[in-house]
Image: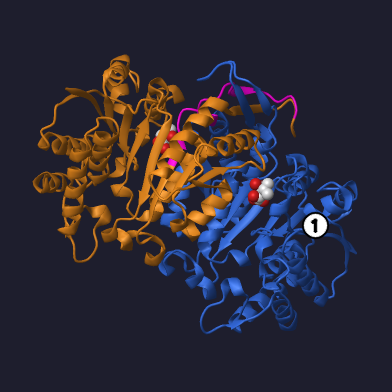
Chain colours: A orange, B blue
């Protein structure tokens, strides 16, 4: 019996997670599902976005199925109580340093991309983002009086970007190994022309490359990567980058597929325990309307079965079922187009279950 | 007599700057042009990418016309001697804190964009990037032994992101004033859900907004901005952001116009003295072939006349001439398409001169 912590969260989180759970149940696997509040919801019920009970549940589980967190209504809270702290806290506490963000353009959704169809048709990039280091967690940070710079004596705020050698080594190994299973091309993205942290990153990626001579490695500055993703996304295979640049580039890449409502993600620790969540956010504007697309979450559940629970066959059944509902022409509002049938969140989940 | 420091630099820099100079000369203005080496070229002639004589020339000039710097062949140099240090050094020494990066889709080049024509036709965004602060120049930075984090005792590299109150205030004023001259909408981009520096940035932008009640202000996280630029770029009017995020977003925005060979940029100090350069890079792969597009540099010269030299009429003549050569169907290779006439760098410069 494997234990799964189910954390629906805010906005559309509960609706989309409910459909993913329905799909998991339909597979009749030896899974025990335990629910807990997280994000704004948890703040309301217990005063903190990541209450001790939720963290404990996640720590004791074999995997975490996560919906989404965040809502405008929590904007006025002090930072440590805002919903996003839950996801940052889980990443840190569980050591989820390797974030897999596939950017895939689904054949049936090519037209939904902002990009011209020929630029995105068949697109399949894997972006690997380091998730527990960098300026996200670096100390010191805060407010102080500037001692140098342009305005010594003025108030300033500051953060610390940092990466240690083992942090870079382990994410580089993950990335090279992922590239080996794909087209054997890895692009490491940095800003080594400006940042010490990036130069160190680049040097270590080059060292780790020696253990993977079958993988072709190149380096790209982050500004250029942001451009090349728009210009010729299909030139990328696997991309590896730090937490901050990865935040930006993975969202850019996801959006240009046109399939953002479809994209799952996995955040893994050193033993393949992971947290699985859709690439999109909590979309408070459409929450409760029953129109959100549950497929990214359903596909996240499939990733969970494959990566953390060693159930690749069950994962494949979910993926095939999703292909099949798309082939049937079923679409939630976000991916609907002339000639396809518009369905609700629940109808989409039901259709996937039926296809299984 | 106004003095202009002309710094062609590396790669295609000399070719494109030569055409811009030709255009300036054709206007018969009271300008004195003085040349100096910069970047890799300067490293070769005098051992440093920004030699004292070049810096002095730039400091004494009323404006700087800059080509581009960088070439793969300098990649092995230590960072302080690499070509990019010249541009960083000039920004810092001249106090060029306000970087104007228009992202305009030229009507005749709509088809050249990666994006569907309806998403970019008529696009006209002004991205304002703070250029002398942030993690680009923040101290301390370097290598050290980690004292905390995931691997205490390990080697690590680090950089400091920082902004002081007056740095944020002055760029915010520039941005609100720019918005007042356009459609009165300003988007401030940050990562306030994670970074102290961003929260400080956001708080101060909100304060400065009180002096510009006619401008509509909104805030966007940088990851979302990277997505929205792809999804619906025309929703933006003026965008203001820090040095690091601005580096990434301005390049992304420039690329999605499809007109990157056409886009000028200005980097201004507090008194409107500025450095003007094309938004694109030094393109060493096509250097010396005579095929580079000089229009971004020619339009940068126009910006220079307008912003730093109070010669708006002369600037308008250049802009009209560029419109006219495009209307004539003249295109360098980067923007060429079926049915238009392919011209060389020099032919394009000549055509602009003729149109003046
Ligand atoms: C909510 C936020 C802190 C988070 C991040 O920046 O990592 C989100 O944008 C993400 O990418 O998962
Ligand atoms: C060359 C590099 C240091 C520079 C920067 O990052 O600012 C460039 O990318 C730019 O945007 O002008």
Quadrant location of the C terminus of chain A in the rendered image? top left
Residue A129 within the segment the image draws in magenta: yes
Q: Does the numbered disc 1 mark a residue whose Cβ is under 8 Å from ligand 2?
A: no
Magenta-colored span: A128-148
Residue A89 within the segment the image draws in magenta: no
- For disc 1, the neighbor class at 10 Å (few under 14, some 14 to 19, many from 20) is many
Residue A297 quadrant:
top left
Q: Residue at x 43, y 57 (%)?
A: A234
Quick one: SS at disc 1?
strand
Image coords of residue B195 (percent x, y): 53, 31
Q: Mark 1 lies on which chain?
A: B
Image coords of residue A259 (percent x, y): 32, 53
Above or below for A261 versus B18: above
Residue B195 visible here: no
Image-based side of B8 in relation to B155, left or right: right
Image coords of residue A185 (percent x, y): 47, 49
Q: Which residue is drawn at 82% across and 48% down?
A: B50
Image coords of residue A162 (percent x, y): 58, 28
Q: How many numbered marks are there?
A: 1
Image-based side of B151 in relation to A82, left or right: right
Above or below for B146 versus B256: above
Along the line of sight, the residue nearer the viewer: A165 or B131: A165
Quadrant location of the N terminus of chain A in the rendered image? top left
Along the line of sight, the residue nearer the viewer: A95 or B155: B155
Residue B32 visible here: yes
Q: Which residue is drawn at 64% across and 41% down?
A: A192
Q: Mark 1 points at which residue?
A: B64
Above or below for B84 versus A6: below
Image-based side of B129 in relation to A185, left or right: right
């Amino acid at each position: 019996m494997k234990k799964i912590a189910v954390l629906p969260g805010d906005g559309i989180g509960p609706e989309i997670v409910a459909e993913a759970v329905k799909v998991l149940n339909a597979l009749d696997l030896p899974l025990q599902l335990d629910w807990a509040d997280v994000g704004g919801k948890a703040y309301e019920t217990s005063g903190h976005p990541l209450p001790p009970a939720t963290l404990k549940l996640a720590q004791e589980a074999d995997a975490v199925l996560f919906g989404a967190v965040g809502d405008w209504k929590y904007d006025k809270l002090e930072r440590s109580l805002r919903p996003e702290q839950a996801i940052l806290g889980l990443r840190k506490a569980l050591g989820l340093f390797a974030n897999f963000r596939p950017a895939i353009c689904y054949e049936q959704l090519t037209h939904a991309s902002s990009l011209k169809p020929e630029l995105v048709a068949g697109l399949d990039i894997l972006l690997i983002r380091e998730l527990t280091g960098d300026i996200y967690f670096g100390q010191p940070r805060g407010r102080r009086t500037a001692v140098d710079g342009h305005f010594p004596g003025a108030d300033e705020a500051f953060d610390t970007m940092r990466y240690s050698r083992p942090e870079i080594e382990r994410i580089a190994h993950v990335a090279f190994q992922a590239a080996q299973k794909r087209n054997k091309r890895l692009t490491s993205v940095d800003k080594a022309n400006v940042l010490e942290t990036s130069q160190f990153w680049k040097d270590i990626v080059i060292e780790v490359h020696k253990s993977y001579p079958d993988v072709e490695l190149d380096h790209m500055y982050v500004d250029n990567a942001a451009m090349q993703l728009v210009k010729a996304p299909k030139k990328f295979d696997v991309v590896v980058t730090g937490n901050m640049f990865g935040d930006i580039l993975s969202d850019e890449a996801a959006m240009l597929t046109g399939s953002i409502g479809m994209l799952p993600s996995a955040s893994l620790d050193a033993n393949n325990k992971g947290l699985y969540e859709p690439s999109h956010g909590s979309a408070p504007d459409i929450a409760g309307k029953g129109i959100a697309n549950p497929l990214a979450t359903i596909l996240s559940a499939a990733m969970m079965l494959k990566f953390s629970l060693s159930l690749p066959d069950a994962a494949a059944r979910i993926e095939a079922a999703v292909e099949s509902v798309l082939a049937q022409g079923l679409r939630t509002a976000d991916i609907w187009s002339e000639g396809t049938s518009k369905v609700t969140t629940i109808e989409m989940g039901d259709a996937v279950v039926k296809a299984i």
